[in-house]
Amino acid sequence: MLVGWTLALLVMVAFASLGRWQLGRMHEKQTMLDGVAATLAARDPLPLSAAGNALRVRGYDWAAGEGVFVDAPAILLDNQQRDGRPGVRVYRAFQPAGAAPLLVELGWLPLPADRATPAIALPEGVQHVAGLLAPPPSPGLVAQHIRKADNASDIVVTRLDAELMSDFDGVGALPPRVLKLDPSLPLGHARDFDILPNTLPPEKHLGYAVQWFGLALAVLVAALILTFRKSSKRR
């Protein structure tokens, strides 16, 4: 009986720990969403140079400025879904006036059945850009894979990692945050301010937490029932 209860307690602790982890992720993501909502409501613009602020690497800020898009390869972030359709998120290097270049997200494009990558036009001339400075989309457990796009000039990547940003072709080092372009601007492709693309929202983490706690409770109930039955047989 002692061995059985020891195993049951170990399993319950493991399930409860997983439940607490899911609750932690829920609170973390909800805090992020609340912070972004406050930033979008205020829209108090910082200069685009704020993308390189080392103290705000994981933060979210509104920024705006003028400059030109660099004549360098576009980055197509693969495996990005929108309304259930597979596609890519398009990024281009942008050179602000009097500041270091940064990466601007121009939006999402669908991929056809053969997954041929689309040609990405370079916006010409001086452009006014504004949007949300944010960390790149979370890559999860996806390994980095880089290949040439079908147009042979742009590149397709599976994650925007530090190595890619540290020495981008023709541009040099890029700051760790990207500018999610304001959807109201007449530039780029379909886009939004979703900061959790292809990842679980807070309510999903809550659901998984409830499941893990429920499993821990089920193990406890099962252990109590088995103990009661053994005690009854002895009597």
Image (spheres, rainbow, N blue to C red):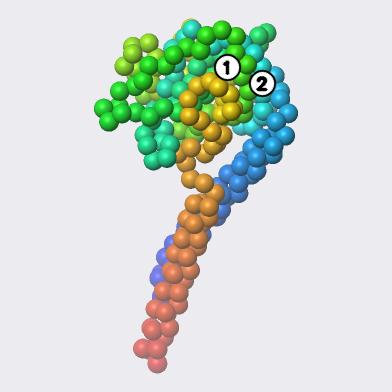
Residue 51 percent across, percent down from the top left: 63, 21
Residue hosting label 2: 64
Q: Work out how far the residue at label 2 is from the one at label 1, CA to CA, in angstroms.
A: 12 Å
- Three-letter code, disc 2: Ala
Q: Which image quadrant: the N terminus?
A: bottom left
- Amino acid type, mark 1: Leu
Q: Residue at x 38, y 16 (%)?
A: 119
> Where in the figure is residue 142, as x and y percent of width and height?
40, 33
Q: Position of residue 25 (x, y in %)?
A: 55, 47
24 up-or-down from 214: above or below: above
Q: Is residue 45 visible?
A: yes
Find the residue positioned furthest to the front. Answer: 186
Residue matched to label 1: 102
Residue at (50%, 17%) from the top-left corner? 92
- Which residue shows up at 41% across the image and 27% down it? 109
Asked if residue 163 shows in the view, the reply is no
| Comes first in the chain, label 2 or label 1 | 2
Quarter containing the C terminus? bottom left
Give the structural element (helix, strand or loop) at label 1.
Answer: strand
| Image label count | 2
Image check: 150 left or right of 137?
Answer: left
Residue sitting nearer the eye, 203 or 3? 203
* Of the pair 17 and 24, the residue shown nearer to us: 24
The residue tagged with tag 2: helix, strand or loop?
A: strand
Q: Residue at x 38, y 29 (%)?
A: 110
Q: Nearer the viewer, mark 2 or mark 1?
A: 2
Mark 1, residues whose alpha carbon is within 10 Å: few (<14), some, or many (≥20)? many
Residue projecting furthest to the bottom: 235
